[in-house]
Structures are given as C-alpha cells and as structure tokens.
Amino acid sequence: MSASRKDILSMAAWFGVALVLAGAIRYTLQNELTTANKALLISGGVLLLVALVGNFRGIAGFFGSRGGKLGTNTAVLVLATLVILGLVNFLGYRHSKRWDWTPEKLYTLSDETKKVLGSLKQDVHVIRFDKASGLDPLAEKVAEYHKVSSHLSYQFVDPQERPDIARQYGVRRMGEVVVASGVRTEHLKETDEQSLTSAILKVTQERQKSVCFVTGHGERALSSSDGQGFSDVQKALERENYTVKPVNLVEAKQVPVECDVVVVAGPKTGYFPEETESLEKYLEAGGKVLTLEDPGTDPKLDPLFSAWNIAVGNDLELDVSGAGQLFGLGAAVPVVTHYGSNPITESVESRMTFFPLARTVDAADKKNVQYPVTGLLFTSDRSFAKNNWDTKQKELKFEEGKDKTGPLTLGVAEERKAVSKTARLVVIGNSAFASNAFFTLQSNGDLFENAVNWLAQDENLISIRPKSPTNRRVELTLGQERLFYWFSLVIVPGAVLLAGVVLWWKRR
C-alpha cells in the first residue's frame, strides 16, 4: 500500500522536528556549533519548510476553522509566555543577583576574603591547566572574586596546545591550578575559598611573617593532632601565610629577631627568670606576645604581667547560666557572648566562644590611665570565680565573701609605644579554647587567629573565616528505622489506597 502525499509531508514534518531537537540538544550539551550540529539543524529546517509549503492549503484551512482559531490563540499565548520568560532570563543574566540561604553562608565570600581582595594593589592571575570542558566551577568562583577586586583575573589553558605556558609555570599534570602575581607563583592543591585566598596572600605579601611558639615547659604541641594539640592552629596560621616555628628560650638565650609574634600556649611548669626577662625585653623593644594561662598552673610570668598592669587570678571560672549545656558542656566551660572594644573581637561580637577550664585575667589597677588595659572576653552575670581552686575538690560551690561573682574578664589586650615600634600584649586565661578539640567550635578559631592578626599588625585579616557545611545527617535507632518503614511504606500508602477504594465503592 503506497503512502499518500499528505502522509509523506506529515512524516517529513515530524522527522524535521526530531532533527531540529537533536541538533539543539547536542549544541546545549557541547556548547559548540559543530558540523554535525549544523547538519542536523539545517536538514531539520529544510524538511519542516518542505512540509509547510507542500501542505499550505491544508494548514490555511485549519487556521480558518473554529478549532484552528482556538489553537492559534493558544499558540500565541504560549509564544508570548516564552518571549516574556526569555526577556526575564536575559535581564537576569545581564543583571544577576544571588541569595545565599545556607546558615553557614557557604556560597558567600567571607569577610576575610573581601578584606584581602579589597587591599590588593597588584594584579593576580588564576590559571587552570586542563583540557576544555563544559562547566568550570573555578571560573565562577574567580568571577565572584573579580566583583570585589578588578585586580583578579582567570585564564583557562590547555597545556597540550600551549606547552610553553605550562613550562613557564612549572605545570606537570592536567587539572593543575596556579595563582600568580609578578614573578611569584603558588600551586593549589584544593580550589576552595580558604586555599584560593591563602594563595593570593602568599603571592602578594611583601614578607612572610613568623609566629614563634615557646616550648620547653609543657606547652601545647604544634605537632600533636590529638584533641589537646595545636596542629589545627598551625594549619590555620599557615593558610594565612604565616611561618610557624617553635622556639626554646633557654637555648636561644633571647627571643629570635625573626619572630613577629611570640605565643606562650598553656605552659604547665614555670619559666626560668632568664626566660621571663627575655620576653620582657622583647616587649620593651616593640615585640608582640600572646600568652594563654591555664588555671592551676604558675608559669612564673607575674613580673611581666605586673609591668603591664595585668593581674592573672589564681582561680577557676564557673558558668552556672546553663548556656554550655546546649552544647553538652558543663559549668567549667564558660560561654562568652560579650566582648570588649578591640579589632580582635569586632568580627565575633555576635557569636559565642568557649573556654574549658579558664581563669580570670583583668587589669591590676583599672584606674591606671598611664597603662590602660582593654578587656576582651566577659562571662555572664551568672558566673563566679572559685578562688584558691584546688584540683582535689569534688564539688565546687559558690562561697559568699570568698568567691568573685560575674561578669568576669577572661582576656585582655594592651599596646604601648616602645622606641619606634608599638608593643602589643594579649593575655587569655585559657589555652584549651584553641586546641584541636575546640578550635572549630563556634568562633574559637576566629578569636585565636584574630589575636595573632592584631599582634602581627595584619588587621586586614581580622574577620570570620570561611565555614564548612554543618553535618545534618539524621542518625536513627533500629526501632526508629522500623517505625519509619511501617509509617512511610505501609501505613500511609495503605490509608490512601483504602480511601480510594471507599470512594470508588460509594460512587459506583
């Protein structure tokens, strides 16, 4: 049975539509108008045109009928809707606006990144060496950086097509990312915001500053990755382009000249008088020191603190407000939500910090106008300091007339003019807040890094660092799993099915 002319034209029309759709889909996926895509689009268009011309009378008759007019109205409405959507999409592309609804603001540049970009005075190039591909998340990320600073640019290079550029930047593998500024380059292992911002710092800063951690008296170890160690501190400081190194004051005889900041991180035994004197001389010459003092210890640094009008209490701070219970912590872990006026605390003032086993630190003489001390960390009014604290005490209760009531000060900062420099000192009555176990809790890590930034006079880095997504996985017990199974796969579907059967039975 031979096909009629009408059937042939109809088949041509449907085949033409199929070819046009195939060409459009291939172009969307490949993002390139290849020869095959052109052939599909052109051949499809020709078949549609042939079908339209060959069946012109039938089409004209259809549009003259009542059904044709209704269909035409519908087509016009659909076309108008598509045009409107296209215009909206075009305007959205030209004037894009994004909203980040994640609690951690995962898709919003952090304050730290914005400050680093805002201080850029030289061009920085981000170069990705890889084969051509469709989507490039790194390009989108650099575009966000470029909105803050025009000094940042992005380039995609295929090392097989441009081996000269690959050799210039020492590229050895596909997918490598290089951040370059002038003659300085940094190869990225990760392309997250922290890594990219850190690389920008490394290629633009004139000199890499050193943070020296005093050792020899049981201080928290930078090399230790357990909960008590400071390995997270070391990683965080190195991301901000600091050189982190240990220093033994007994062996060195004095604070090395290359130390821009000295950190005393929770010593368990007292320093020798010569070591304390070394720290005093370092401060007198315009040095910067961060000292973390744990309760129940005596680092023998009182002469230094007295000279700076600072008093470290022989006590243990207890917070009975119950705020710590929300995080599974007890009264011995005071929660700080009130902060003093200092660049260190500006970016964390609306957040919480936690201090496991802390002692009070305050001005020795608050009326001393020559050496004013700035309070940094304040506990709630439902806290108290247990004086003459003894580790053997099983129960710690408030004793009227003996213990000091809150709010209490847990940390202070002070700066003085020394010769041609400005000396700075920060004292906090706790070191565990920056340990690996607590570093990532709320703003503990930000507080420690901000203190180092302020001491190093890198105020442009003082901010809240990029956050990691919160783990929101739901852990179900075996009983909960069974209840969920029966409720979602048996009870609810069964109820819907039963309701359907009842309705059918009533209406039949």
Image: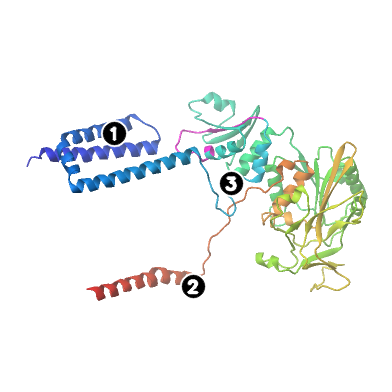
In front of the other: 218 or 347: 347
Three-letter amino acid code of the residue under disc 2? Gly
If the image is split into quadrants, where does the N terminus sit?
top left
Disc 3 on helix, strand or loop?
loop
Residue where numbered disc 2 is placed: 479
Find residue 318 and report its image quarter: bottom right
Position of 106 compared to 279: left or right?
left
> Residue 402's x, y, as percent?
88, 71
Residue 425: give its label. none
Position of 6 compared to 71: left or right?
left
Q: Nearer the viewer, mark 3 or mark 1?
A: 3
Disc 1 on helix, strand or loop?
helix
Give whichever of discs 2 and 1 has the lower sequence position. 1
Q: Is residue 216 above or below residue 258?
A: below
Q: Residue at x 10, y 39 (%)?
A: 4
Q: Nearer the viewer, mark 2 or mark 3?
A: 3
The magenta-colored residue range is 122-139
Determine the CA span between mark 2 and mark 3. 40 Å
Position of 500 compared to 147: left or right?
left
Q: Residue at x 86, y 73 (%)?
A: 400
Residue where numbered disc 3 is placed: 108
Callout 2 environment at 10 Å: few (<14), some (14 to 19), or many (20+)? few
Three-letter amino acid code of the residue under disc 3? Thr
Residue where numbered disc 1 is placed: 40
